[in-house]
Amino acid sequence: MIEINSLTKRFGKITALNQLNLNVKKGELLGLIGPNGAGKTTAIRIISCILHPDQGQVLVGGYDVFKNPLEIKSMIGYLPEEPNLYERFKAYDLLKYFGELYGVPKDILYPRIDELLELVGMSSRAHHKINTFSKGLRQRIGIARALIHDPEIIIFDEPTMGLDPATAITIRDFIGSMKGEKTIILCTHYMDEADSLSDRVAILNQGRILDMGTPNQLKSKIHGDLILKIDLNGPEKFLVDDFNSIKSLKGTENVFLNGKELNISLKSKEDISDIIEHLNSNIMAINTKEPNLEDVFIQKVSNLQEE
Amino acid sequence: MRYWTISKWELKNTLQSRKFLLIFFFQLTVLVMMVFFFNGFMANIESQEGVGLTPSLNEFASLDVDDPQGIFKKNLNPEILKIGLANNDSSQSLKQGKLNGLLLVQNTSDSINYLSPLQSEILIDYSDPKRSVVRDEVILASNKTASIISQQMIDKIIPNSGNINEPQIQEQTTGESLPMQLIKKIMTAILLFLPLFLFGNLVVDSIVGEKERKTGEILIAMPISRSYIILGKSLAVIMTMAIQVALWIIIMLVAGFSLGNPLLVYLIVVISAVPIVGITTIVAAYAKNFKEAGIGITFAYIGIVGFLIVPALAYIAQQGNNISFSSMTLVIKIFSGESLRWGDIIIPMIFILIISIFSYGSAIWLFKKDEIVFGPRPGIVKLFMDFIGITTIIRKIKGF
């Protein structure tokens, strides 16, 4: 459904996307994760024809972003990171305005507005002005706005960012309910969100895809059965020699230091005692966990930084 | 036709905004007040008395007079001089600066009888800045008195000489004086063109507001080209101006202004709004925030006002039949009831067309640039080089 080949985008001297390659299948939910400034928003803005690419090819539903931007825009429902809506509009009018801009016929538009307001739980606030809404309510209206023309492709940029846990769960459930029906790109900082919702996840950093696969495929690349998380007393005391010696221990797969937190992937629990013995007094707290997407992300990003 | 959707909603929101309506009706109120003031002013200026535009000189200086016969005193101008009777304290008051002058006149009856010169003496303080006014007024009074005495002498020699008819000049006027034309025609034209400069903030709010409130991103994500976004928003502002100009014209007609052909005048003023909104749109498309846009629009409007008014003033001053590119001149010609030639209409319209194409083209070109809408915004020099194609040439030379 979406094919990106050798996509490059520069802002002045900054290269936001560097020869990016990505594809999204029809009906798939692709999670796009990466640190701040990785190029996630730039990538989805180019797919949505908001930004113009400098080089490369982007095909959406067979249309080229250079040649057929209006056709592509009609296919996409885009929810930006900040639900920046027209404050002076009432919720109902806002949906009507965007519905008209998408060219939705009136006989379809009006029932669709009612249906969407019901779906996002905003029917009772339909005739209230946007400037009276909290961020969570605005995000709900933002989602309804993105879906007003019943798009084939939906792009969510950090849809749960800054929301309270209850609202975030509601929105995640809503996105999950569309899985399979729509092609969805979900940009997020929340690894558990990407893990639970995505069919595939792409890790993006410095304008390039570092890795891509199903959450399980990515997690299996950690190579260990479990992760040992150690909070260090003094990370400054943790020297390169310590790093190398732990890495050389039998059963240790990977070692990553993330601030005060040392992550070590191990083959089995039996190997823990050797590490405790080695670090000795530098341990403040210790814990074990199953490898998750966050570990994959940290590993990939750390590897790139080391390079 | 999706740009019409943008225009329709922009206009709807503007007209529903309480803040806008307050400003809109405030402008109308100001116009009504200006019309009343203008009408009152014109009534005065056209009256026989005229209107005093200089500050009043009533009793500007004080003069004590010793004129036993009173023939000199009655010719002094009491509106400028505060005239008093000379007494023993007058010399002292003059020295102390309480008095600006002292006039002593000899007994005039002797002078008249024996045909000897009329003797008078004026005492003034040379350090007093009002002395020259006193001296001038006394000289004027002296000339008047001399004329009267001469007439009295002639009457004694030739009786009934007063019945000889003096030559009389009858004044017949056509047309209006230059100051009248400036006031009537230019002022009326300015009143009509004024609404075009009152809605720059709408353009700014409509375009810069999208950037500042970050709503532009979702608007650009709509299946509508950026050109139509600019054109749609501009059209909404032009429609708002058209409503305001229509109301102003109605008010002016009710107030008794002669506008020649009001419908044609209305059309010309509204068409003139197109390039003005276009130029405002360039500023708004480039500006990062409201403050920048405000500064830019101030400069732009100074230029536009000059472009409109200077040719109009030149036209009135020269009284020629030169064809002007300013639409304000065309409006003034209609006010004057002149028969219009094709050139009078076509030349301003061509200018409006050229400026409109250039301004909207530039605004659209700017708005299509990602770095203008989303940043980092390039400098004006780099943009200008891009605009005239130098950047492309440099890139080609460098091979990328």
Image (cartoon, rainbow, N blue to C red):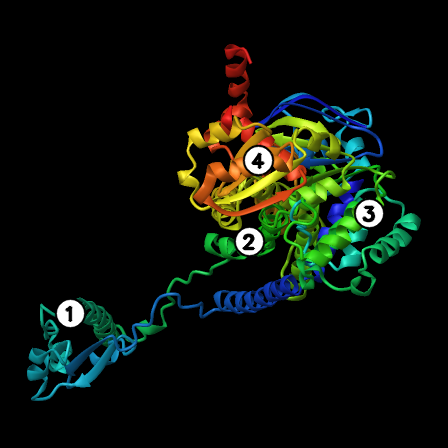
Query: Three-letter amino acid code at disc 2?
Result: Ile
* Earlier sequence position, callout 3 versus callout 4: 3
When asked about the image quadrant of residue B222, the answer is top right
One can see residue A14 in this view:
no
The secondary structure type at the circle numbered 2 is helix
Residue at mark 3 shares a chain with residue at mark 1: no
Please tell me which residue lies in front, B255 or B101. B255
| Residue B297: percent from left, percent from top | 51, 46
Report the disc number at residue B284.
none
| Mark number displayed over residue B131 | 1
Pair 2/3: label in front: 3
Q: Quadrant of the N terminus of chain B?
A: top right
Q: Is residue A141 above or below residue B154?
A: above
Amino acid carrying label 1: it is Arg
Q: Are marks 2 and 3 on the same chain?
A: no
Identified at 36% across, 72% down, the residue is: B163
Mark 2 in CB contact with mark 3 (< 8 angstroms): no
Looking at this view, name the residue that lies furthest to the bottom.
B88
Q: Along the polypeptide, which appears first: circle 2 or circle 1?
A: 1
Horizontally, residue A173 falls left or right of residue A18, namely right
Q: Residue at x 39, y 62 (%)?
A: B167
Circle 4 is placed at which residue position? A264
Q: What's the distance in space between the residues labelled 2 and 1, CA to CA?
A: 44 Å
Q: Find numbered disc 1 in the image and state the secondary structure of the residue it sits on.
A: helix
Front one among B276 and A163 = A163
Quarter of the picture containing the C terminus of chain B is top right
Which amino acid is tagged 4? Ile
The span from disc 1 to disc 4 (Cα, nearest Å) is 104 Å
Rounded to the nearest angstrom, the CA distance separating label 2 from label 3 is 42 Å
Q: Is residue A172 visible?
A: yes
Q: Pointer 3: what residue?
A: A99
